[in-house]
Amino acid sequence: MKLASVASLVGATAAVPLFFAGDSDVPSSARTILAVTTIGMTASSTALVTWALKPYITSLHVMHRPGHPAEDSRIPMVIETMTFLAQPRTRLVFPEQLVPATLPMTSWLVEDASESLRDFAKDIIDQINAGRKKDLVTLASKGDLFYAHTQGPVSAEMQRILQAAPSQ
């Protein structure tokens, strides 16, 4: 959806010169208004789609650590969302960083990690990113938002994550 919205914005922008090509009985001021309206409507719908889908979780993995209970709050999750151009954005987050969000289309708000948690996360992130050149994993920042779509079939692991995390 995001990619289609961006593509329509690019297409509409590329089509603007066609409004002014050739002879027509339509005054140039009307053509200009039509072109500006087309770009404005396409840009606003792209901005709305981008805003609504920014926190949408496309992938979530729990990094199980042998010998640690599943309820351990220091078991990190790797959460993937999308950027404006629908590229993956991957962040590491710990359950203790998550609090319920109150904004529409959001499930969790990320709180700042403690110094010890940041140090612990740095080692994990360095291991994950070893040898990567793009799609690097970063620690989730204070204020990041995530939306977990929980309607419909949900895997057993996702059910466990939702039960352990703050309520939505």
Image (cartoon, rainbow, N blue to C red):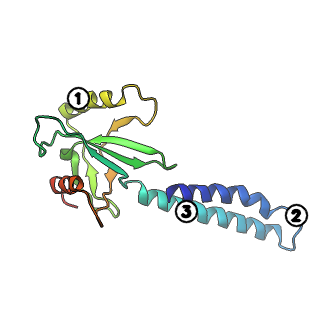
Seen at 40% across and 34% down, the residue is 136
- Residue 128 lies, with reference to residue 94, above or below; the image says above
Q: In x, y percent, where is residue 90?
A: 37, 42
Describe the element under mark 3 as helix, strand or loop. Answer: helix
Q: Are marks 2 and 3 in contact (CB under 8 Å)?
A: no
The residue positioned farthest toward the bottom in the image shown: 25
Q: In x, y percent, where is residue 10?
A: 64, 54
Seen at 24% across and 54% down, the residue is 158
Seen at 89% across and 67% down, the residue is 23
Which is more toward the observer, 160 or 45?
Answer: 160
Describe the element under mark 1 as helix, strand or loop. Answer: helix
Which residue corresponds to mark 3? 44
Which residue corresponds to mark 1? 119
Which residue corresponds to mark 2? 22
Examine the image and state in which quarter residue 4 appears: bottom right
Task: Pick whichever of labels 2 and 1 is earlier in the sequence.
Answer: 2
Q: Nearer the viewer, mark 2 or mark 3?
A: 2
